[in-house]
Every structure is written in C-alpha cells, then in structure tokens.
Image: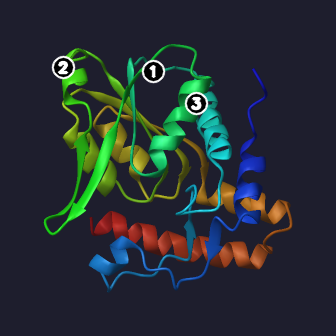
Amino acid sequence: MKLVLTIQAIIVALWDDECIVLGDTYETRYNREHPEAPPSPFRINIRTAPDGPLTREFVFEIGRHMAETLLQTKTRPQFQGIFGIPNAGNILMEGFLRQWPANLYPLILEKVEDGSGRRFNIADTDGLQYHRGYEFWGVDDLVTSLYTKEMVMSAIPNRVVGISVLIDRSANAEERLAEKGIMLSSSATTASMLTILVSAGRLTSDQAIAIAKADQAFCQYMADHP
C-alpha cells in the first residue's frame, strides 16, 4: 500500500489549490441564519468538480490520511459501520475505507434541502435493517459547530461511537461529544493549520495571528449560540 500523505502536504496542497480561502466576505449558512454573528475569516472547500477544484483521487488520499490518524490513536475504537456526512464526507468515506484494515458496512446518507429546511435521509433503509447491532463511525471534512453532526446522528438509529474530521476549528466540539461518549478524531486544528501555512511560506505570522483571533471569535459565537 502506498504511503499516506502527511497533514503538512495536505494543508499546503489545499492552499495551493485555493481550497483554503481567506477573507470575511464568504457568507456561511450560519451567518445567513445569524446575521449578527462575526464573519468567518476563511473557508475550506474540500469538494470535487463541479463544486470544487479537487480530484476524487486527492480527496480519497485525504480520507486515507484520516483513517490512518485514527489507527494511530492509543485506544482504537471498535465499530462495524461507517457513514460520510454529505457532501464532502461521502467521498472522504471512500478514501477512509481504502485505508481501514477491516471491512465496514458503508451507510449512505442523502442531504435534502427544501422549503421545510435541511435534513438527512438514509439511502438504504432496507440494508440497515440487517445491521441493527452495528456501531458506526462518521467522516466529514471539518467541524465548526456540532449542529450538522447532531442532525445527522439523530437520523441514524444505530449508535455512533465517533467522528473523524480533517480539521477541528470548533470551540468545544471534542469536549461536548465526549460528554455523550462519542470520540472526535481530527488531523489538524485551526492553530496547527495556520502554523503549517506559516512554515510553508504561505502566510506571515501576523496574518496567522489575525486569522486565529477572528476564527476564535466566530467559532465561540457558534458554540454559545447553537
């Protein structure tokens, strides 16, 4: 099996492919619903065409890295099924499965957005009936707040034991999930991402400090106003 990309290589590649974009002009879903909230100082777009610039193979490699990160933890969790949180999580899940040493049942979720709001449906409810005792692990690109994660987990009847993300930019998601007995595995935080970009010459130290301060305000507001 080929080597897994390092987090440093992934972060720099995302920057160079303009998947990490600075600026507070990007209006997140949260900002639309809470116009009084501080703006997000950057956005991360881990998407393939037509929604983003990345190839499926590169996103698969990110998923492999996320699986390897979890494999290196001291207490590897036990689970028999996996799901991706749409949309980025579905492709990341495929990469995760390429690296994970055991067979996992892939649960496919569909995101539906209509006049009644946003919700997540299980694509194969019949198949899930044969895996009622399975415990599941989730995969997504990042966590800012737990709003979407909790919405997805509430749609899954089975127990969810943990979630892998590439970047944890939240204020307290790991602690809040741990209170429910759910593990959060992340390859990077906002701080470590910025450190990598400074070391690679993509950002100055002053830029990184300003971004970190603004992101802390944005994420803390989300944590205080779910």
Which secondary structure, mark 3?
helix
Of label 2 and label 1, which has the lower sequence position? 1
Identify the amino acid type marked 3: Ala
Q: Nearer the viewer, mark 3 or mark 2?
A: 2
Occupied quadrant, residue 129:
top left
- Residue 207 against residue 52 in the figure, above or below: below
The reply, left or right, for residue 50 in relation to residue 123 is right
Q: Mark 2 = which residue?
A: 129
Q: Residues within 10 Å of mark 3 (few under 14, many from 20)?
A: many
- Tags 3 and 1 touching, CB below 8 Å: no
The reply, left or right, for residue 216 in relation to residue 17 is left
Where does the image place residue 103, in percent across and percent down from the top left?
Answer: 48, 14
Instruction: Tell me the quarter of the image containing the N terminus.
Output: top right
Instruction: Tell me the quarter of the image containing the C terminus.
Output: bottom left
Q: Which mark is residue 131?
A: none
Of label 3 and label 2, which has the lower sequence position? 3
Which secondary structure, mark 1?
loop
**Who's the residue at 57% across and 55% down the image?**
48
Where does the image place residue 141, in percent across and percent down from the top left?
Answer: 51, 50
Depth check: give the residue in front, 203 or 13.
Answer: 13
The reply, left or right, for residue 154 in relation to residue 57 is left
**Who's the residue at 62% across and 39% down the image?**
60
Which secondary structure, mark 2?
helix
| Separation (CA) of disc 3 from disc 2 | 26 Å
Where does the image place residue 93, in percent across and percent down from the top left?
Answer: 49, 36
Of label 3 and label 1, which has the lower sequence position? 3
Q: Mark 3 = which residue?
A: 67
